[in-house]
Image (cartoon, rainbow, N blue to C red):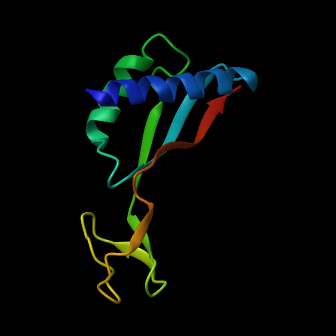
C-alpha cells in the first residue's frame, strides 16, 4: 500500500507544477522507477488512475521507465549495471561497492495541455 502514498506525492508534485505553467490538463507523466525501489509499476499505474480522478491529471497517461541497478566499486573502480541483489562487483568480486542508482522513483517530466 506504500504505492498510494508515492502516487499522492507524484500528484502533489505534478499538479502545482502544471498550474504554475498555466496548464489546464496533464496529458502524460513520465516516471523513473529503480529496480530496487520496491515499487510495482502496475500497482502505481492503478493507484494513479484512481487518485487522479477529479484533478487536472485525470486520464493522464503514466509512462514508467524502470532504471537498472548501477554500482561503483571501491576496490577496482568498476561502474556499471548489475543484477538486483548482486552483492559482489562483477569485475573483481569485491563487496566494497556503493549503489549509485536503482533505488530511485522520480517524476522525470510531464506533458500538459494549455
Give the residue drawn at x 33%, y 80%: 89
Residue 29 appears in the rendering: yes
The quadrant in which residue 61 appears is top left
**Extreme residue in the right direction:** 21
Q: Residue 42: horizontal and vertical position, in percent?
A: 27, 39
Q: Residue 69: horizontal and vertical position, in percent?
A: 37, 64
Give the residue drawn at x 71%, y 25%: 114
The quadrant in which residue 98 appears is bottom left
**Extreme residue in the top direction:** 54
Total numbered badges shown on the rendered structure: 0
Q: Is residue 7 above or below residue 80?
A: above
Q: Observer-nearest residue: 60 or 44?
A: 44
Q: Is residue 113 above or below residue 88?
A: above
Q: Residue 66: horizontal and vertical position, in percent?
A: 38, 55
Q: Locate the N terminus and report the quarter of the image it occupies.
A: top left
Q: Is residue 36 above or below residue 5?
A: below
29 left or right of 65 in image:
right
Give the residue drawn at x 26%, y 71%: 87
Q: Residue 104: horizontal and vertical position, in percent?
A: 44, 49
Give the residue drawn at x 35%, y 47%: 37
Q: Observer-nearest residue: 23 or 65?
A: 65
Residue 22 appears in the rendering: no
Amino acid at each position: 500500500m506504500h504505492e498510494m502514498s508515492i502516487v499522492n506525492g507524484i500528484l502533489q508534485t505534478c499538479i502545482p507544477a502544471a498550474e504554475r505553467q498555466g496548464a489546464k490538463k496533464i496529458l502524460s507523466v513520465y516516471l523513473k522507477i529503480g529496480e530496487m525501489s520496491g515499487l510495482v509499476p502496475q500497482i502505481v499505474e492503478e493507484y494513479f488512475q484512481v487518485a487522479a480522478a477529479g484533478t487536472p491529471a485525470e486520464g493522464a497517461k503514466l509512462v514508467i521507465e524502470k532504471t537498472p541497478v548501477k554500482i561503483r566499486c571501491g576496490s577496482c573502480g568498476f561502474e556499471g549495471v548489475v543484477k538486483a541483489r548482486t552483492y559482489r562487483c562483477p569485475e573483481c568480486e569485491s563487496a566494497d561497492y556503493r549503489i549509485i542508482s536503482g533505488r530511485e522513483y522520480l517524476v522525470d517530466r510531464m506533458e500538459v495541455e494549455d
